[in-house]
Image (cartoon, grey):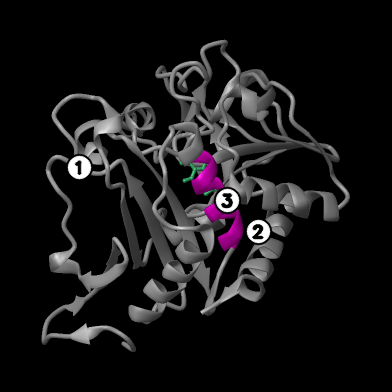
Amino acid sequence: MAGRAYTGRYFYMKVFLNGELVDQNDAKVSVFDHGLLYGDGVFEGIRAYNGRVFKLKEHIDRLFYSAKAILLDIPMTADEISRAVVETCQANGIRDGYVRLVVTRGPGTLGLNPFKCKNPVVIIIADKIQLYPEQMYRDGMDLITVPTTRNHQNAINPAIKSLNYLNNILAKIEAVNAGYEEAIMLNPAGYVAECTGDNLFIIKGQSMMTPPLEAGALYGITRQTAIDIAVELGLTVTEPNLTRYDLYNADECFLTGTAAEVMPVVKIDGRTIGNGQPGPYTRRIVDRYSDLTSTTGEPL
Ligand code: PMP
């Protein structure tokens, strides 16, 4: 594989760490890093398709917004990070893959105080990802609502893509324990927020709906792309507060995320959505998303 050193058994990956591309075995962070000790940091998950990084600018912008919200000074400019993402993909021969971009608070003391961490750490890993089995994209997914609610916006605002994912992990545990791949999380007021790592959409007639950001949804980049596609398809898009009743009685449902892409949902809490098959608009959104990802983005 181009760009990767073949050592006989394994391909060794190059990882971007603080301005340098290092061997994966040398890509190490301190045990005093507050990213590890406290989940203090921010991250992005980005995909490359067909030799292009999809929506790179949007991801870098969101990284900086998340960092601003937690008062974290990223020690690189947006342009430098964009170039580093491209270079890390190139160094690993990635033309179709997944990039994990992480900025931690950096090493500090054993106390919480983030101001004692003077050197934030920037990490970029370019690899592959397959979140769900192929068959699920054809047949659709079953979801379950779980008891753990999404963080209140005055706790950890769900708009911040922080390294502190325990809220989502608790919900994921509840889903997996119940035999499901993904969970619907409500917010503390009881409205639908999102899934553990994806945004949620329903379609009823000619109308597409997704929870508003203030309901506890991440400002998903795939979410915005799905909204743009739906508008192109002539659907009316709104962001109302949704209850589980609204989900159960939808004609179609799907979830979106960079890693998950566009995943049809055919059952929620045992209620069949529509006729139990991925819906016609959902299929068109999947197709259009696939066109966009393979033809647009920052060239590698
Ligand atoms: N919600 C959460 C909680 C997420 O972690 C993600 C990203 N995995 C999303 C939604 C989807 O966001 P995006 O489309 O920008 O990947």
Q: Residues within 10 Å of mark 1 (few under 14, many from 20)?
A: many
What residue is rendered at 48% in x and 70% in y?
83
Asked whether residue 255 is in view, the answer is yes
Q: Which mark is residue 278?
A: none
Q: Which mark is residue 107?
A: 1
Left or right placement of residue 252 versus residue 127 in this view: right
Q: Residues within 10 Å of mark 2 (few under 14, many from 20)?
A: many
| Residue type beneath disc 3 | Asp
Q: Position of residue 269 (x, y in %)?
A: 51, 26
Disc with the residue nearer the chain's start (2 vs 3):
3
**Mark 2 or 3, closer to the camera:** 3
Q: Position of residue 96 (x, y in %)?
A: 46, 74
Q: CA distance from mark 2 to mark 1?
A: 42 Å
Q: Residues within 10 Å of mark 3 (few under 14, many from 20)?
A: few
Q: Which residue is mark 2?
A: 286
Q: Position of residue 39 (x, y in %)?
A: 29, 34
Disc with the residue nearer the chain's start (2 vs 1):
1
Residue bounds of the magenta highlight: 55-66
Q: CA distance from mark 2 to mark 3?
A: 25 Å
Do tag 2 and tag 1 residues touch (Cβ < 8 Å)? Answer: no
What residue is rendered at 44% in x and 54% in y?
45
Q: Which residue is mark 3?
A: 61
Disc count in the image?
3
What residue is rendered at 56% in x and 13% in y?
190
Question: Callout 1: helix, strand or loop?
Answer: loop
